[in-house]
Image: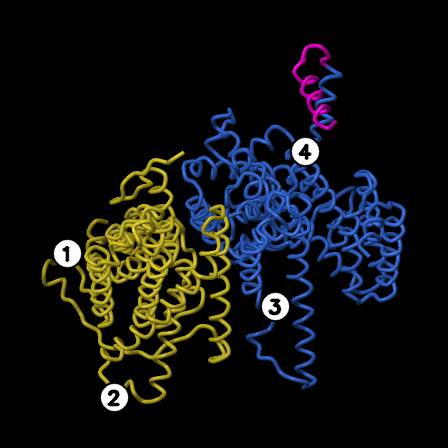
Amino acid sequence: MLNEILQTIPQVVIDGLTLGAVYAVIALGYTMVYGILELINFAHGEIFMSGAFIGTAILIVLTGMGWVSAVPAIVMLITVLVLTAVLTGLLGMGIERVAYRPLRNAPRLIPLITAIGISFLLQDIVRFIAELQKGNYIVTGPNLFKDQISIKASSISAIFNDASIKTSFVIVLVTAVIMMIGLDIFVNRTKWGMAMRAVAQDRETASLMTVNVNKVISITFFIGSALGGATGVLFAVQYGTIDPYIGFILGLKAFTAAVLGGIGNIRGAMLGGLLLGLLEMFASANLTLLSGGVFGAEYKDVFAFAILIIVLLFKPEGLLGKPVTEKV
Amino acid sequence: MKSQWKKYKQNKLAQGIFLLIYIGITSLSLFMAQRSVTAFLLLLSSLLLLYFTNFKNLTKWLIAGIVLVFLLPFTASNGDAYQSYMEVATLVGIYISMALGLNIVVGMTGLLDLGFIAFFAVGAYTYGIFATAQAANFMPFGSFPLSGESFWIFILIGCFVAAIFGLLLGIPVLRVKGDYLAIVTLGFGEIIRIIFNNLDRPLNITNGAMGIASVTPPRLFGIDFLYPSQFYYIVLVILLFTIFTVRRFEHSKIGRSWKAVRENEIAAQAMGVPLVRTKLMAFAIGASFSGMMGVVFAAKQAFVDPTSFTLLESITILVMVILGGMGSVPGVILGAAVMTILNLQVLTEVTNWLNQLNSTGVFSIPDALSPSKMQRLIFGLLLILFALYRPKGLLPAKNHVYNEKELQEGCTKDNGDNLKSIPEHSQIEKAQEV
């Protein structure tokens, strides 16, 4: 049995890293907003989904104009990524302005409810537009990267099977890593990053120190949503088919990743995302084998939620977070 | 105008006459124009009018009983739309009961539960499995399907099993608070659905995504319950029981503990409210209503499958609670009724109407925009608008207001000399008034 598991390991690692990178970048959005407002931005998964649709729409339009074949694919991708990131960033800012800011002093249940409302609203609006334009809400985007690379893992050691990857995998991983490093530098080295950390620590004191709190919160939402939207494009490029309901489960898992790494902690979110991606892929490849056929790959979602519940119960501060005591 | 309105508000006779005329006209129009959904809805809304009258509680209940038990089924029974009306009324009852259950958890105790439909699913599957041959796959004894008479016991069993699931969810969840709780319950709801969806192997318990078909109908004194018009009465009885229990709970010790926990957990604990027990009770009791209605739902549809228990359903019930007013029993009843009717009647009617317009070529609306598909949009908008502008809902929860003077007088009468400070106090008040 161990042999069989080992054989699949190279493929599992590659798929797990791809998925994990997607989770990690979305988890960043959750963790930043939570760190600053102590609010779970339920709509973040839907921002990711909107990003996937906006990116695909731009690609389809550009293909229609014949630009895609003229320009190298990587330039195309970067243009689409930047455009989508700006648009979803603005979307995120708008959501904060409409649904969260008026409720900043309300009981904590209320903004959570508007967040659910926003996410339902976004799902349906995207469905309208997709269905109006294409006749079906399940959309397949143009394929930018078609090459397959085969990794001869068997040449390293005989116990591994060969793995195959799409070129887009490299691009997803590299882009995600660039985004994460960029964010880390932004938060830790720049003036705005410092303001952000100040607001996260103590909103009132920060405002006394001439930090414009509303602006900082808006920027946080912009960056989180821009990253989420850009990841949506990466997702669409990597997996091809998208529908308006992908955001929910994916967002939930990304949230799990954020909790796993320690919510509010940016590096924790990255670690948690990669870890969760690897674990999930491992589970979906080997669950049948491990449980002797009782559980199949369809239980991988249950597996992810079980991780969430276990972490929340036994180590609510996550892997990298600090334990917080409640103030009375 | 305003003074007249005030006069009307105080005049019970005028209210009674108006209500009588209203009920008379709407039921007559339902009786005459069988296909009119409007008449049906107007007759239902007479209950809302009744709620706003000044009658005694007992009178209100009696009138509501007469309308629901006799008038509504009788006036609707005259045409071919009878069963569809009763179907709507039955579903309204089922959803009201569930929303009241969720109201205990969300509205009274302040624990946001996003996986509430799981308990409904548990109830539905409990009856579904045992009332079909499905149970023979794993039960070592007994012959299945069970007869229709067992339905009545299964209402209790469903209630009990759902309560146990509520406890099972509650125990781990007690350690997490607020937003985390919402996410964990959401995850729990999804887990239950996925498990029901995949429990066809290694042992076929739920028949997986295919669902369980031809559930045995309930049977009483040799009569099989097959039509919505018959289930209507079962639902009505359970609903009455639910409303009665919820009301009793609300004003009992446990109900006040729930509200204390909602307002401030730490303060409540300091005042001696046992946190663990109170929260677990809320989960278990809330879940049990849902479980009961799950059994009825399984019997009514005669078919159970996992697609009836998605997150959208959980959110639907949440919208009912928010719309009506968190923690307010009449509010939640109104919210549930409005949402269910909107979902089942209004949206489908509007869609049909639009389709007719399309086919006659007046103007055309693309299929993507058909209102029956817009549930998410409508729910989302309602959640946002109500959270922003009317967080207390349509009929906000009222706390019982005590008349301070009356209490003081009562005190003086009862205790006489023992409490001297109070008479003194009232004397001071009198002096001040002078």
Label 1 – label 2 distance at C-alpha = 44 Å
- Residues at marks 3 and 2 touching, judged by CB atoms closer than 8 Å: no
Label 4 – label 3 distance at C-alpha = 38 Å
Colour of chain A, in one word, is: yellow
Label 1 – label 4 distance at C-alpha = 67 Å
Q: Earlier in the sequence, mark 4 or mark 3?
A: 4
The residue where tag 1 is placed is A159
Magenta stretch prevailing secondary structure: helix
- The numbered mark 1 sits on a residue in which chain? A
Label 1 – label 3 distance at C-alpha = 55 Å
- Residues at marks 1 and 2 touching, judged by CB atoms closer than 8 Å: no
Image position of B366 (left or right of A146): right
Between B411 and A288, the one lying in front of the other is B411
- The numbered mark 3 sits on a residue in which chain? B
In the image, the segment drawn in magenta is B415-434
Residue found 33% across the figure and 71% down from its top: A86
The residue where tag 3 is placed is B372
Q: Nearer the viewer, mark 1 or mark 2?
A: 2
Disc number placed over residue A19 in the picture, else none: none
Image position, residue B399 (x, y; %): 65, 37
Where the C terminus of chain A falls, by quadrant? top left
- Name the image quarter holding residue A214: bottom left
